[in-house]
Image: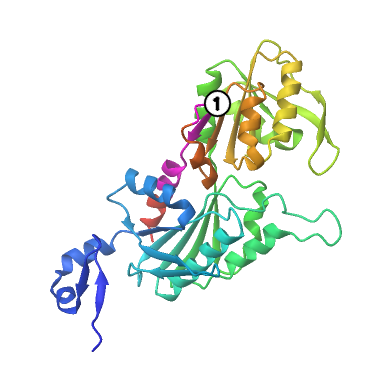
């Protein structure tokens, strides 16, 4: 005999008779709240979102197991039929991208009314165009992959933060509605914490000059950038600076820090030009190949700040050299306001 069961909000297993005895008011109260899921790597961000707005979200539960050959098993434990569903997960590497994709497809299959993917860090962002013949534009193929997620009853939406190239949001196809959020206020908070009211807001190269100049105007400080020439795929050379930084605090912003090579070169140039102190801020802190340690031990930086869009920063939360600003308030503000109108 088959027994109908369900998992309640507190994890209790309910059999069929108990399900029928639940009062409609309790059921409807629960169903008014969007369900929040996250991939394994982004459980930390799910916890922050829930902690900041506990009355606005219902926690989504998923069982994840791995077979000896490395294949991943996932099972959705929370009923999602005709519900508003939000799934948090960055495309920080290929396995995490596929975990996000598999889970998103299953949520639609099991009846999600709306599906919002929150991808705080969109991987392969620097591979947004082909420079040499034969190069794969991986940012676009990843966008196509996420665009192939089945269509929920009402709509699919994809929320991203500080894309490396703004035009990438137009890589998504079919029924996906891309949303590009800016972590501008978090960057301003970190910049003022470092430089207070008198500093120069700088960038690593002229490529980010317009964004940094706009941000500097909002803060009311001077903007600066360095001119550089690329020597190879991993090496650049500084050829000049456009502003006077002697005796000033310099706060460098870049949208992502991977190996930190360009950042170190820029800091050296600002120090050589007479900067009193140099700080660095990034939205996406990847810190590949011990990059954070390199920055810390270089002696060039007073402190570095980043947001927690990339899961790797959680391992350095206790490092006083790194100031971490959470994107949870930014996401909660947008998601709660927008899901209210679904």
Residue 49 in the image: x percent, y percent? 38, 47
Residue 273, quarter of picture: top right
Quadrant (top left/top right/bottom left/bottom right) for the C terminus: bottom left
Q: Is residue 5 above or below residue 136?
A: below
Residue 35, quarter of picture: bottom left
Residue 323 in the image: x percent, y percent? 50, 30
Residue 337 falls left or right of residue 218: left
Q: Is residue 234 among what the camera can see?
A: yes
Residue lying furthest bottom: 1
Q: Is residue 237 above or below residue 339?
A: above
Residue 95 in the image: x percent, y percent? 57, 61
Q: Nearer the viewer, residue 281 or 28?
A: 281
Specify the segment rendered in magenta.
319-334
Residue lying furthest front: 68
Residue occupying the point 73% across, 34% down: 262
Residue occupying the point 80% across, 59% down: 135
Q: Nearer the viewer, residue 23 or 45?
A: 45
Q: Which residue is mark 1?
A: 191
Residue 18, quarter of picture: bottom left
Residue 257 falls left or right of residue 85: right
Q: Is residue 235 above or below residue 92?
A: above
Residue occupying the point 52% across, 18% down: 196
Residue lying furthest top: 247
Quadrant (top left/top right/bottom left/bottom right) for the N terminus: bottom left
Q: Is residue 214 among what the camera can see?
A: no
């Amino acid at each position: 005999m088959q027994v109908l069961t369900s998992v309640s909000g507190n994890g209790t297993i309910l059999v069929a008779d108990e399900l029928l005895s639940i009062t409609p008011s309790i059921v409807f109260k629960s169903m008014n709240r969007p369900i929040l899921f996250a991939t394994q790597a982004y459980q930390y961000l799910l916890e922050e979102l829930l902690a900041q707005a506990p009355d606005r979200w219902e926690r989504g539960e998923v069982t994840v197991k791995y077979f000896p050959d490395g294949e991943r098993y996932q099972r959705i434990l929370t009923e999602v039929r005709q519900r508003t569903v939000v799934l948090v997960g960055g495309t920080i590497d290929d396995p995490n991208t596929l975990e996000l994709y598999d889970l998103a497809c299953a949520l639609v299959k099991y009846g999600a009314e709306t599906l919002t993917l929150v991808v705080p860090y969109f991987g392969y962002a620097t591979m947004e165009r082909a420079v040499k013949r034969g190069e794969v534009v991986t940012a676009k193929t990843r966008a196509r992959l996420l665009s192939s997620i089945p269509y929920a009853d009402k709509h699919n939406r994809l929320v991203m933060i500080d894309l490396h190239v703004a035009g990438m949001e137009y890589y998504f196809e079919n029924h996906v509605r891309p949303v590009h959020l800016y972590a501008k206020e978090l960057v301003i908070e970190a910049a003022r914490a470092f430089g207070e009211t008198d500093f120069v807001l700088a960038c690593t190269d002229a490529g980010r000059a317009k964004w940094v100049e706009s941000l500097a105007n909002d803060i009311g400080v001077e903007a600066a950038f360095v001119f550089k020439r690329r020597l190879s795929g991993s090496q650049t050379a500084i050829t000049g600076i456009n502003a006077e930084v002697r005796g000033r605090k310099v706060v460098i912003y870049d949208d992502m820090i991977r190996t930190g090579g360009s950042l170190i070169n820029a800091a050296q140039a600002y120090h050589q030009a007479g900067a009193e102190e140099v700080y660095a801020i990034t939205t996406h802190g990847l810190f590949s190949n011990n990059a954070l340690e390199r920055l810390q031990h270089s002696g060039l930086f007073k402190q570095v700040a980043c947001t927690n869009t990339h899961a790797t920063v959680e391992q350095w939360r206790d490092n006083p050299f790194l100031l971490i600003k959470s994107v949870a308030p930014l996401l909660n503000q947008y998601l709660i306001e927008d899901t209210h109108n679904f």
